[in-house]
Image (tube, rainbow, N blue to C red):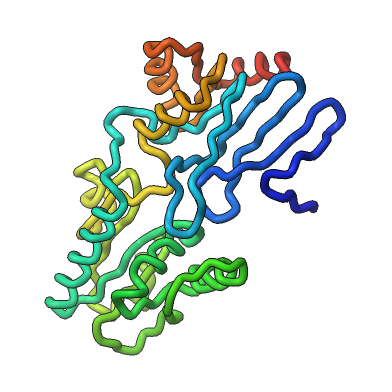
């Protein structure tokens, strides 16, 4: 397996490829393909970036394939600092009730952001998988602050960060836990009820609807293909704004391969 350097151009037979920042998480990248025209595939995209990675880079292109997980106007996220402030208030309220706040975030990407946001204010303990990923981030030069590996021993005023899949771990049952789920899907009022958590806040490592629009406008492509999530709805919105856009389903994939 060969590692590719961000921003460096690599010749691949009849075309060249480059990786550029996608803002999704540390190391996540977009793919740029050039051969007399330019195609950009965003992959998972967060235009503004986050606490542990740079913002997405936007390049003008001829063909754009864009991830549209939150490609519906319903998904408009509040400023990140407001979400984190609300999370901190929730944590302090749980501490006042002698409950242990458990913040649920995906173990790679989201959990490292949460560690960095919370470690300067609270005693942070993390799930073993998150601990390993945190160490990898730190080895790559990303400062996350002070944190510890999760322990079942009682410690006052701690915050626990766990992946969502581990929230029913037996070790947590002994703590009088209260759960907060961090995800863009939390813009839906019913998210916390569906997941059985006390709080759900919209901290996302994907672009919301309006950031996706800004990306497309800056890239100014001749053709846009939308993939994943609200692909059909986002393509329809782009057509209404004057772009040639279609949701990339199987038949469109064959057409794109012919185009290349």
- The residue at the point 34 percent across, 45 percent down is 184
Q: Residue drawn 51% across and 51% down? A: 54
Q: How many marks?
A: 0
Residue drawn at x 26%, y 52% is: 201
Residue 42, above or below 51:
above
Classify residue 260 as left or right of residue 67: right
Residue 246 rendering spot, x and y as whole percentages:
50, 16
Q: Position of residue 241 (x, y in %)?
A: 39, 13
In the displayed structure, 145 sits above or below 155; it is above
Q: Is residue 63 above or below residue 155?
A: above
Residue 157 is drawn in which quadrant?
bottom left
**Left or right: 184 as drawn, with respect to 247:** left
Q: Check the picture and name the quadrant holding the C terminus.
A: top right
Residue nearest the observer in this picture, 34 or 75 = 34
Relative placement, left or right, of 69 versus 21 is: left
The picture places residue 186, in percent across and down from the top left corner, at: 28, 46
Q: Residue at x 36, y 37 (%)?
A: 208
Q: Quadrant of residue 95?
A: bottom left
Image coords of residue 145 (percent x, y): 43, 75
């Amino acid at each position: 397996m060969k590692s590719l350097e961000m921003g460096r151009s690599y010749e691949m037979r009849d075309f060249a490829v480059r990786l550029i920042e996608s803002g999704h998480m540390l190391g996540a990248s977009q793919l740029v393909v050039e051969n007399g025209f330019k195609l950009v595939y965003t992959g998972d995209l967060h235009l503004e970036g986050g606490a542990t990675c740079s913002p997405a880079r936007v390049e003008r292109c001829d063909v754009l394939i864009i991830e549209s997980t939150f490609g519906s106007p319903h998904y408009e996220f509040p400023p990140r600092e407001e979400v984190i402030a609300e999370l901190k208030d929730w944590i302090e309220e749980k501490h006042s009730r002698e409950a242990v706040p458990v913040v649920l975030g995906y173990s790679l990407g989201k959990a490292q952001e949460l560690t960095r946001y919370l470690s300067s204010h609270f005693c942070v303990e993390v799930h073993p998988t998150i601990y390993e990923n945190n160490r990898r981030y730190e080895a790559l030069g990303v400062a996350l602050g002070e944190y510890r590996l999760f322990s079942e021993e009682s410690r006052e005023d701690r915050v626990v960060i766990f992946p969502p899949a581990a929230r029913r771990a037996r070790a947590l049952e002994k703590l009088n836990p209260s759960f907060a789920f961090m995800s863009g899907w939390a813009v839906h009022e019913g998210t916390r009820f569906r997941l059985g958590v006390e709080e759900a806040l919209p901290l996302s490592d994907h672009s919301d609807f309006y950031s996706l629009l800004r990306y497309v406008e800056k890239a100014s492509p001749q053709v846009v293909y939308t993939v994943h999530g609200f692909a059909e709805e986002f393509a329809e919105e782009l057509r209404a704004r004057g772009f040639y856009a279609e949701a990339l389903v199987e038949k469109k994939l064959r057409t794109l391969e012919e185009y290349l």
